[in-house]
Amino acid sequence: MGYRRGKSLSRDLEKQSYDRETAVGTKGMVVSPHWAATDIGEKVLKEGGNAVDAAAAIQFALNVVEPMMTGIGGSGFLMVYDNKKKDVKIYDGHTRAPKGVHPEMFLDEKGEVVDFRKRSTHGTAVGIPGILKVMDKAINEHGSKTLADLIQPAIDAAEKGFKVNWVLEEALQNFQYRLGKEAKAFYFPEGKSLKEGDTLVKEHLAKTFRILQKEGISAFYEGEIAEAIVSNLKEEGGIMTLEDLKNCRLTIDEPIWGDYKGYKIASSAPPSAGGLTVIQVLKILETFDLSQYDARSWEKYFLITEAMRLAFSDKIAYSGDPECSSLPIEGLLHDDYIAERVRAINFERRNDAIDFGNPWKYQDGKPNQVIRQPDDLEKSETTHFTVVDQWGNIAACTSTVEHPFGSGIMVKGYGFLLNNELTDFDANPGGINEAQPDKRPVSCKSPTILFKDDKPILTLGSPGGPTIIGSVFQTIINIIDHKMNLKEAIEEPRIFASAGPLIEWEPGISMEAKGEMESKGFEFGDKPSRIGNVQAIQIDHEKGRLYGAADSSREGKAAGITEDQIKVS
Ligand code: GLU
């Protein structure tokens, strides 16, 4: 039997959580959204491993303890800063579309877009998972340990069992509808949801990890695991073939670079629109000098809302896979274009006319056609973690199965879930983000590193689909403009606006400022909700200190390493 019912563990008292979620170190730091994964990463660093080693071990561990958010059936962007070479690269293992996809695959016989829940839990939503390619390549290029070593702690956790936490329990309750038959039977034994405190053993996942340990990732892309994926998908209407899995490839990309108030920012590059949009929002905001306003003032909420609305209108119009279309990256960040966008902000009242602009005026290229999309996407929630090692290298990874529990399709006998990332393609074809074979859908993942005087001083990221961008830039302005410490910057309640009419908001924002915003024409959602889950590390080069902080919206943990804790072999 794979589970044991247990007593509900009471949630940590606020003080205890705070202690768990913050840490100071001198020779390394690990921050992840689950304490058990942080413990595993911390052990890797203490045993002399580096940031990439720890990141790989965390990724495997999260597949066990946070299976609704990430896993080998998904994808991710890993940003690696190599402190010796002073070089930042992005290992892009974003999902690609199988050869058999076509631009109309999310339309029904009448040509209408299939309802989101239906299209996101169907076999056609599943993209070719790339996260194993990322981890394998990054370990080969930067790691000091083997994938076989780094997957072992996750095998132990899966075989011995782990305690279900409130985050998993809540996800099971809220997203039960996403689970396919296999996943439902596993997470709802005897028809009842697993609860906080239950012990869950994952024999099948452990078996899969043992295969990877022995045979390497080729077992996933060409061997028995590949065969299981393809045959499971066939039963769910999927189109992925063995050939598709065999041809899976990653790219190693330069980040997108930007500046904000004297800090250099490196963030994810297309097909993630995340980095570009974070930088665009910050460039718009730089004109207004937010530091003169209180963090909870209406002025700040007003400016960041309009900046998000402007940047998201552009994001929706101009994002795509750079292998398939030319993108107006230069135009979007061009100073004159930013100045043009800033003029759309009328600091008296919401500008109802905000829409996408024309960055192609500032860059050569062939303007793309913009196709409007249905506003029916549900918010995705995945995972971010980050590590700094004793040599000053950084790994920052946002990885995902897309929506909670991905497509809900669990590979029979192998214990992992397949993503639904192809729903990030436009459902209405004709634009640059339409589904096409071998193409990658637009992502918002934004692993980000800030530099001051060419030294890294902050690494951060968040899950949350489009809200990732909002969470990342708000944490940055909280630190730079509002002079908050790292934990305060993460906990400060966030708001989020895209091109739609409503502002999402977290509990704790100023109600007075909200009222003022409403009087200026803005509309807020009825109820507050959680936005993102930021994991970050700040590096103080002068003091030789590392500060880590995990977001209280999950059971995250920061663990700092000191010199005496590192085993010298
Ligand atoms: N759809 C998301 C993206 O790639 C998945 C990541 C997330 O939601 O956290 O942008």
Image: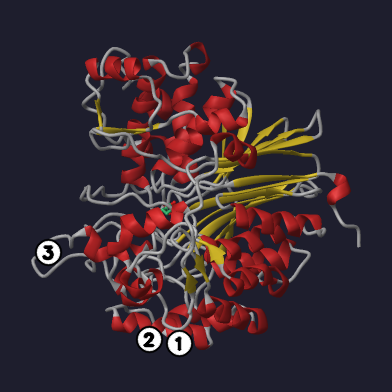
Earlier residue among tags 1 and 3: 3
| Location of residue 195 in the rendering, given as x and y in whole percent from the top left corner | 42, 60
Residue appearing at x 50%, y 22% in the figure: 286
Q: Is mark 3 within 8 Å of ligand 1?
A: no
Residue 124: which numbered mark, if any?
Answer: none
In the rendered structure, are the residues bearing label 1 and label 3 in contact, judged by CB atoms less than 8 Å apart?
Answer: no
Quadrant location of residue 322? bottom left
Disc 1 crowd rating (10 Å Cα; few below 14, some 14-19, many 20+) is some
From this viewpoint, is residue 442 visible? no
Name the residue nearer the viewer: 137 or 184.
Answer: 184
In the rendered structure, are the residues bearing label 2 and label 1 in contact, judged by CB atoms less than 8 Å apart?
Answer: yes
| Location of residue 351 in the rendering, given as x and y in whole percent from the top left corner | 25, 22
* Rendered-image quadrant of the C terminus: bottom right
Q: Amino acid at mark 1?
A: Glu
Q: Nearer the viewer, mark 2 or mark 3?
A: 2
Residue found farthest to the left: 110
Q: Is mark 2 within 8 Å of ligand 1?
A: no
- SS class, disc 1: helix
Disc 3 crowd rating (10 Å Cα; few below 14, some 14-19, many 20+) is few
Residue appearing at x 25%, y 37% in the figure: 500
- SS class, disc 2: helix
Q: Can you identify the residue that label 2 sits on?
A: 231
Name the residue nearer the viewer: 213 or 100.
Answer: 213
Q: Nearer the viewer, mark 1 or mark 3?
A: 1
Q: Is residue 514 above or below residue 221?
A: above
Disc 2 crowd rating (10 Å Cα; few below 14, some 14-19, many 20+) is some
Q: Amino acid at mark 2?
A: Ser
| Location of residue 294 in the rendering, given as x and y in whole percent from the top left corner | 47, 14
Q: Can you identify the residue that label 1 sits on?
A: 227
Residue 111: which numbered mark, if any?
Answer: 3
From this viewpoint, is residue 279 visible? yes
Q: Is residue 522 above or below residue 171?
A: above
